[in-house]
Amino acid sequence: MPALLGGDYILENHLAYGLRAPLGDRIVLRWGTPRRSEIVIFVAPAFEKYCIKRVIGLPGDIVEARNDQLFVNEEAIGPSAKPFAAFRVPDDHFFLVGDNRDASTDSRHFGCVAQDRILGRANRIILSLDPDRHYCPRWQRYGQAL
């Protein structure tokens, strides 16, 4: 599964997990929940801005970082620069991290994210421009599933 890069533009499914009221964020009907490794769009609790991160911890999971590794239920899933003690992800919450973990402001900083704050799921990369190469297109990434 590809990681998101700077300059990627994505197609998002706002109906992936449920139907929201037209005016407001109230969920009218829920038919799904995020799964591990999905990329979701949400409103960050710390600064009330739209963010996009990968789901790492599900409700009830034990998450911790030690020895430069991130662990979920005692299974190493990738690098983590900052260690933190083990904790249980609360019910109806998710632990979200950025694909660029060392430079990402994510659940390690603002805590677990309530399911009601998750707005949708990223499905595909629809456009990818490389900011390090004068925004030249990265053609191989166009249309790639996430």
Image (spheres, grey):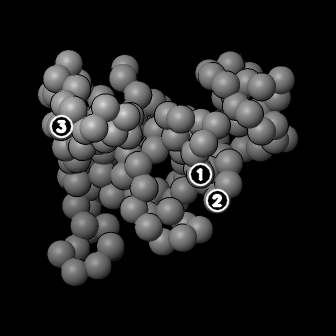
Write down the residue under mark 3.
127
What amino acid is at disc 1? Thr
Residue 44 locus on image (x, y percent) = 50, 62
Furthest toward the front, the residue is: 134
Residue beneath the point at 27% across and 38% down:
134
Image quadrant where one finds the C terminus? top left
Write down the residue under mark 2.
110
71 is higher (above) or lower (below) than 57 = above
The answer, for residue 59, to whether it is visible in the render is: no
| Quadrant of res 30 | bottom left
Q: Nearer the viewer, residue 142 or 57?
A: 142
- For disc 3, the neighbor class at 10 Å (few under 14, some 14 to 19, many from 20) is some
Using the numbered discs, state the Cα–Cα distance from disc 1 to disc 2 in whole angstroms. 8 Å
Q: Nearer the viewer, residue 5 or 28?
A: 5
Residue 142 locus on image (x, y percent) = 16, 27
Which label number is shown at residue 105?
1
| Quadrant of res 2 | top left
Q: Earlier in the sequence, mark 1 or mark 2?
A: 1
Are the two marked residues, 1 and 2, in contact with CB atoms closer than 8 angstroms? yes
Tell me: 44 left or right of 11: right
Using the numbered discs, state the Cα–Cα distance from disc 2 to disc 3 in whole angstroms. 29 Å
Q: Nearer the viewer, residue 41 or 99?
A: 99
Q: Earlier in the sequence, mark 2 or mark 3?
A: 2
What amino acid is at disc 3? Leu
